[in-house]
Amino acid sequence: MSVRITCINKSNGDHSNPYEAISHYGWMEDGTNKTGITDRQTLANWMKEGGVAYVQDKLGKVYCKVNTSAKGTEFLQTFADGRYSDNLLSLMECK
């Protein structure tokens, strides 16, 4: 199963602050169009068990991988052209 990440929420609700971490991801499931908002660790665990998440941009799909911060926090990060990128940070705030 795969989901398209459609929006994000950041810790403390400060979407424009680049130092605040993403706390939740909004998503839409391929094939069913089911939607939801899932916390960072739950979605990371789902991906480690074989789930696939991506961001759709004007050039196509950019897939996510689970990355780990220096403090051991797992989070999703897009991976394009052989390197990590910040496509998730450009998404709108989840309502």
Image: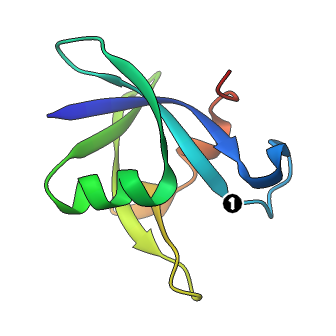
Coloration mode? rainbow
* Quadrant occupied by the C terminus: top right
Picture coordinates of residue 40, whole percent (x, y): 50, 55
Position of residue 77 in the picture relative to residue 81 (left or right) = right
Viewer can see residue 57: yes
Report the residue at 22% width, 44% height from top.
Answer: 52
Position of residue 60 in the picture relative to residue 70 (left or right) = left
Q: Residues within 10 Å of mark 1 (few under 14, many from 20)?
A: some
Q: Is residue 67 above or below residue 55?
A: below
Picture coordinates of residue 36, whole percent (x, y): 43, 26
Report the residue at 80% width, 57% height from top.
Answer: 18
Q: Is residue 89 above or below residue 56?
A: below
Residue under label 1 = 21
Q: Which of the pair 81/71 is nearer the observer?
A: 71
Picture coordinates of residue 64, whole percent (x, y): 36, 51
Res 35 → quadrant: top left
Mark 1 element type: loop
Mark 1 is on which residue type? Ala
Report the residue at 71% width, 48% height from top.
Answer: 10
Position of residue 16 in the picture relative to residue 21 (left or right) = right
Res 94 → quadrant: top right
Q: Is residue 93 above or below residue 20?
A: above
Picture coordinates of residue 32, whole percent (x, y): 20, 12
* Quadrant occupied by the N terminus: top left
Viewer can see residue 80: no
Q: Which of the pair 63/6 is nearer the observer?
A: 6
Q: Which of the pair 45/89 is nearer the observer?
A: 45
